[in-house]
Amino acid sequence: DVKVTQSSRYLVKRTGEKVFLECVQDMDHENMFWYRQDPGLGLRLIYFSYDVKMKEKGDIPEGYSVSREKKERFSLILESASTNQTSMYLCASSSPSGHQETQYFGPGTRLLVL
Amino acid sequence: ILNVEQSPQSLHVQEGDSTNFTCSFPSSNFYALHWYRWETAKSPEALFVMTLNGDEKKKGRISATLNTKEGYSYLYIKGSQPEDSATYLCALHGSARQLTFGSGTQLTVLP
């Protein structure tokens, strides 16, 4: 079974703090993704990576950065957390197989920024 | 950014009822349509990937159809059970390599 794990299920941080969200997958997948999910909105793509040390901006990258130093690990960084970054964050991974590739998701991290 | 719409936003049905909901997408930019189920406190999990116009996929009591010419997909659940309660997400794989998700249909099956 594919397993995608995220470092925390719940996180409370203060405005201005630097926040690290970690994601690890155990299936040797090349592709990894970070999404956020807010009520009434679909999953929105923040950043993704197709290989180690590669990163590409998604639809809403502002206020975020990412790091992919190892194939199995993809980190999302909030340099200076703000209240509008309170959200559910989901990590996913996939193996390239064209347009039919299935993404496997972690359980999510619910972040509250006070 | 592609526009993927799902309706209804939420739905309550009685146990045993059959139900269906819709995913609409721009037909001009279609490569594949994915359905995911997201149960509370769990990870979203893939249900179906559909690519061909007229495709129909089935998994137990859940099935999905695809119309790429008019840009929609239906998800059907026959004889809903409380364990079917979840948010059902559709996602479009367009010309870009990433998925564009709809906002989901939240289904509650009442015992």
Image (tube, rainbow, N blue to C red):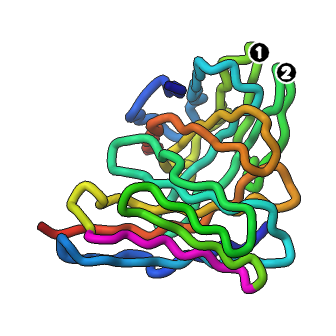
In the image, residue B46 above or below residue B34 = above
Label annotation for residue A109: none
> As drawn, is A14 to the left or to the right of A104?
left
Q: Which residues are magenta?
A: B70-79
Quadrant of the image for the C terminus of chain A? top left
Q: Residue furthest left?
A: B111
Residue at the image position 76 percent from the left and 39 percent from the top: A48
- Name the spot of residue B84 as percent of width and height, x first: 30, 59
In reply to whether residue B74 is colored magenta, the answer given is yes
Q: Position of residue A77 (x, y in %)?
A: 66, 31
B45 or A86: which is nearer to us? B45
In depth, the one of A55 and B70 nearer the eye is B70
The reply to whether dot 2 and dot 1 touch (C-beta < 8 Å) is yes
Element type at mark 2: loop
Output the chain of dot 2.
A
Q: Amino acid at mark 1?
A: Glu
Q: Does B101 sit left or right of B74 as displayed?
A: right
Q: Main secondary structure of the magenta part?
A: strand
Residue A35 versus residue A18 in the image, above or below = below
Residue at horizontal 26 percent and vertical 70 percent from the top: B79
Q: Chain of mark 1?
A: A
Query: Which residue is found at the position 43% from the left and 44% from the top?
Result: A112
Earlier along the polypeptide chain: callout 2 or callout 1? 2
Residue at (71%, 54%) from the top-left corner?
A: B99
What percent of the width, then of the height, locates residue A106? Answer: 50, 34
Does the segment drawn in magenta span residue A9? no
Res. A53 mark: 2
Q: Quadrant of residue A80?
A: top right
Kind of element beneath mark 1: strand
Name the image quarter holding residue A2.
top right
Q: Which residue is mark 1?
A: A69
Q: CA distance from mark 2 to mark 1?
A: 6 Å
